[in-house]
Amino acid sequence: MSNDVHKIHPNVHPDSQFHPGEHSAVPHPPPQDHHRAGDNKPFPDTGWRGRPEIPSVNGGDGEEDFLHKPPYNWKSEGGLFKPKYMSECWCGNLAFEFHGDPVDAKHCHCRQCQHLHGAPFQWAVIFPKTSVRLIRNENNSLHFFSTEKRTGEHYVPCKVSCDVCRSPIFDEGRNTVLAYPGSFKFKDGKVPLDFQPTAHIFYKERVMEVPDGIPKWSGHKGHSELMQELSDDHAKMPKYKGKAAPESETDVSPEKLNGLNDA
């Protein structure tokens, strides 16, 4: 194996614990190390006493009065909902609050996420529906999009965004919400450790390499093939394959520089 592997430093949270993984040339935790403390525990009691226990758990558009149930505008009994995080859209018309920490976080490289987000992959943190609550909806700015029906309606699973600035807020699933950390307002401006992704999923559909030391799954985490991050022969980022610009195009004369400064 090339010694270049030692030159790669995973771009991860400084408090993360890493161990060598036999499926990758870059040290990172094997799958079993990604078990979260609350993975097999029931969702926290946040004071939702309505019915059903998890709104829209069966999917589709059959949930009546869904805007007054989790994860939208609902009442917590006994003050059990303790806001820890807040997210809002770019224009500020929409805002949500979140109880506790996410149960998991991931990067998704599927074609749908690439297309809908206009990005090489999606970063999402997962919260139980009853740990999410709408606290601001000015000018009735909630917008829903059903990826299954390809229509602008609340048909679970669906994507939730602002109808004014178009900022994506989260995906509403049958049991959980997949929120986008880019819309969160962290008190110290730093992303918490619990928002650190534990996996890349659908990595076989990637459009770029991400040598960050986090396990890569060909499909869903734990239910697909674990992919090697980089080549054992090279263990380094692929070289730029484009053509270098001629020196005549990259050199800037003092005369040209002065002209740019005067523009």
Image (cartoon, rainbow, N blue to C red):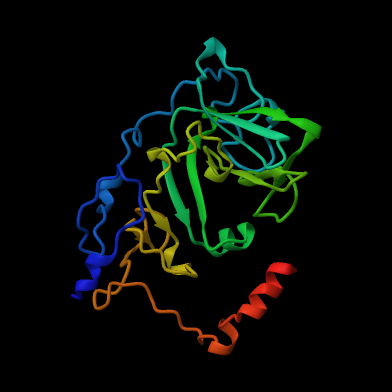
Percent across and percent down for residue 56 are 61, 36
The quarter in which the C terminus is drawn is bottom right
Instruction: Describe residue 67's horizontal placement relative to residue 23 as left or right.
Output: right
Percent across and percent down for residue 21 are 22, 59
The quarter in which the N terminus is drawn is bottom left
Residue positioned 67% across, 47% down in the render = 167
Residue positioned 46% across, 21% down in the render = 45
Percent across and percent down for residue 223 are 36, 56
The answer to whether residue 210 is visible is yes
Picture quadrant of residue 218: bottom left
Percent across and percent down for residue 256 are 66, 79
Task: Count the marks.
Answer: 0
Picture quadrant of residue 86: top right
Instruction: Describe residue 261's horizontal placement relative to residue 219 as left or right.
Output: right
Looking at the image, residue 163 lies above or below residue 215: above
Residue positioned 69% across, 37% down in the render = 62
Picture quadrant of residue 155: top right
Q: Between residues 220 and 53, which one lies in front from this camera angle? A: 220
Q: Between residues 184 and 262, which one lies in front from this camera angle? A: 262
Residue positioned 33% across, 66% down in the render = 229
Looking at the image, residue 141 lies above or below residue 203: above
The answer to whether residue 71 is visible is no
Q: Between residues 220 and 179, which one lies in front from this camera angle? A: 179
Looking at the image, residue 242 lies above or below residue 87: below
Q: Between residues 203 and 193, which one lies in front from this camera angle? A: 193
Instruction: Describe residue 141's horizontal placement relative to residue 214 as left or right.
Output: right
User: Going by the picture, which residue comes out furthest to the right?
Assistant: 139
